[in-house]
Amino acid sequence: MRFPPFPPFDRHPPRFVSVNQHRTAYIRHGQGPPVVLLHGYAGAIWNWEHQIEPLGRRFTLFIPDLIGQGLSDKPRVTYTPAFYTDWLCGFLDAVGVGRAAIVGHSMGAGLALSLALTHPDHVDRLALISGFPRGLLDHIKSSQLRRLHQLGSGWLFGLGYRLLGRRAFRKFIGGLVTDRNLVTPAVIERAYHLRKDCGKARPLWSSIQHVPDWENDYALRLGEVRCPVQIIWGQQDRFIPCSAGEELHQAIPGSRLAVIPDAGHLPMWERPADVNRLITEFLTSLPSLTFTQPGDYTISVPRSLL
């Protein structure tokens, strides 16, 4: 496969590993305890481009493209939460990581929670960015995603996906951040070419159709999570509002919540210095937690401290 000539691949060429007989693309970088970074729905490795160097100074990072997305294989399977969780277990085994801190964004946060609930021995602690609350579809503010979920036709979804152009990407990514000046022509070109050259609609369609599986099999069990949990949310998230982060915080005993001002749904990309500091402090300085009542640990991050 020809690697895309875009950041971060220009400095960190992807590796590939076989996971359950499917090829998974990932970046490995840094030294120290293992940390796995999981992107969200329709995301990719590049969502973590501002974490690679800073976090790599303290940790060994494993940053995959989720199965069915990015440069990873896109098998014709049903993309249920259980399938993604099984793939993640296989990925950890394939790269030789028995237990790690998991940092997940949006859908990747849901996957991290699913792993913590079903294979807690693999999870040291969780950092959850912009997800994944109960009643997800009730929280989602994006009319685009609501319409996609209600299409009822994979064929129509696939047609719309194939017709996506640069203007649509500009609108979509612009809706995920507060500062639209960050959505430069280079950013649009990267997202457009990765979709055109490597993307397929079917995994995305299948994933969104199985959101109810998350609700039925995992969301009702959030109170069972027993590892330390840091939740990070953008105060101006127009995709999944900050109130969903508050609800997630209340659902997970002993969790911590940090709210980042002037940030939308991609705070790790829009406000990387702040998010990197929070992640580093959480992974290195957090004492053992006593899990009693939800909401024991709350952090509000005022603008003056960021």
Image (cartoon, rainbow, N blue to C red):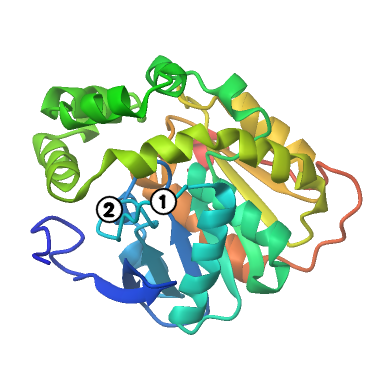
Assess disc 2: are there few (<14), some (14-19) or many (≥20) residues with their C-alpha within 10 Å of its C-alpha.
many
Residue 32 position, x and y percent, is 48, 82
In the rendered structure, are the residues bearing label 2 and label 1 in contact, judged by CB atoms less than 8 Å apart? yes
Does dot 2 land on a helix, a strand or a loop? loop
Task: Give the residue type at disc 1.
Answer: His
Taking the spot 17% from the left edge, 31% from the top edge, the residue there is 162
Count of numbered circles in the view: 2
Taking the spot 49% from the left edge, 57% from the top edge, the residue there is 277
Q: Could you say which is closer to the camera, residue 206 or residue 185?
A: 206
Q: Is residue 6 left or right of residue 144?
A: left
Assess disc 1: are there few (<14), some (14-19) or many (≥20) residues with their C-alpha within 10 Å of its C-alpha.
many
| Residue at the limit of the structure toward the right, as seen here | 292
Label 2, label 1: how many angstroms apart (C-alpha)?
A: 10 Å
Q: Could you say which is closer to the camera, residue 161 or residue 34?
A: 161
The answer to which quarter of the image holds residue 13 is: bottom left
Task: Give the residue type at disc 2.
Answer: Gly
* Among numbered discs 2 and 1, the one appearing first in the sequence: 1
Residue 281 position, x and y percent, is 58, 62
Residue identifier under label 1: 39
Indicate whether 140 appears above or below 261. Answer: above
Indicate whether 245 appears above or below 9. Answer: above
